[in-house]
Image (cartoon, grey):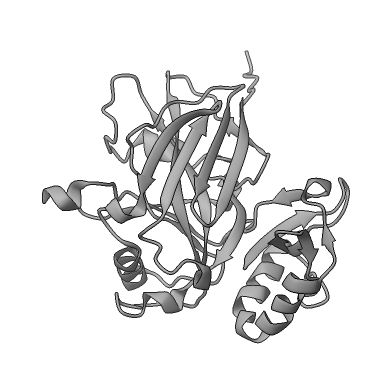
Amino acid sequence: MKIVLFQPAQDGEPRLGLLTDRGIVDIAEVVPTGRTPRGSIQRLIDGFDALRPALERLTANGHALPAESVRLLPPLPRPGKILCSTGGYGARSEGDLKPLLLTLKSADAVVGPGDAIVLPATDEPWSFYPEAELGIVIRGPAKRVGQDGWRSAVFGYTCVLDVMPRLPGEAVGEVRFGRDYWLAKADTLSPLGPCIVTADEVPDPNALRVRSWINGEPRQDYSTADAEYRVPEILDLVTTIMTLHTGDVIAAGTSLEGTGPIRAGDTVAVEIEGIGRLSLTVTAENVERAA
């Protein structure tokens, strides 16, 4: 099942829906719109087991709006936590496994399909690299789930672009945990979407093809099977440190092979097998400084 948040008209209120082969099916009759889109999504995730039969009926028979007639929004607006894994790809097979670390991004980093990534203004010549990653959508509360119980904490999956800054001359993948990781927390630098695919439709999250494009040119192309740290290991570590709550998101790391910088005027896209394609434009922050 593919869950979306959409706007039926330019000035309409955000609504929950299902992305189907027939179009977008509004599910307000099953999950009434709450005070905030975030609250509606959380209520759907927490009550999904009971709601599922009704949602399946709507998937098959509900009235579908043409996909081109609505605007898709980030399916997880303003997550409580966005955790980004530093785990890379390939080292597991080479026997050189670096410690797993995670960083936090703010809810203001989230934008969705068709939105703009706004590159922050800087005094130094930073470049910004979009990193295509599998996003893990949490059903909580989850604490100390262990590698055997990780599935209990996962509601589904989405696409994430973790936009990271780099100075000229820096090696690909160099980690300094300084100004670069601070800039990475800027607004709009963690796009996600276009939907949340429920976990039952992804039997093995460590067997998915992930691809990205800049201006239509292929860039990243890797399999999550080659991850240094698999989804169970990431959830095991994170939940020993903090409690994960419904609607939190973990970006599960990336392969840096093929990554490249983006500039204002570019387009960028990520596509994950079985989940979908997330496409965005790129602009730059316009800051007027006082004389």
Front residue (pair 169, 10):
10
Residue found at x 44% / y 25%: 261
Q: Residue at x 38, y 34 (%)?
A: 180
Q: Position of residue 124 (x, y in %)?
A: 42, 19
Which image quarter holds the N terminus?
A: bottom right
**Front in this rendered view, residue 13 or 226:** 226
Name the residue furthest top: 291
Q: Position of residue 187 (x, y in %)?
A: 58, 40
Position of residue 114 relative to residue 204, above or below, is: above
Location of the C terminus (image quadrant): top right
- Where's residue 275, x and y in %? 54, 56
- Camera sees residue 97: no
Q: Is residue 191 left or right of residue 96?
A: right
Quadrant of res 29: bottom right
On the question of residue 109 being in view, the answer is yes
Residue 22 x %, y %: 76, 59
Q: Relative to 155, does residue 215 appear above or below in the rendering?
A: above
Q: Is residue 201 above or below residue 174?
A: below
In this figure, what is the number of numbered marks? 0
Q: Is residue 60 left or right of residue 233?
A: right
**Residue at image location 60% in from the left, 51% down from the top:** 193
Can you tell which quarter of the image residue 267 is in? top right
Q: State the image quarter where residue 170 is shown.
A: top left
Q: Residue furthest left?
A: 95
Q: Point out the residue furthest to the bottom here.
A: 50
- Could you say which is closer to the camera, residue 25 or residue 288? 25
Left or right for 71, reference 205: right
Residue at the image point whose x is 39% and y is 77% from the top: 143
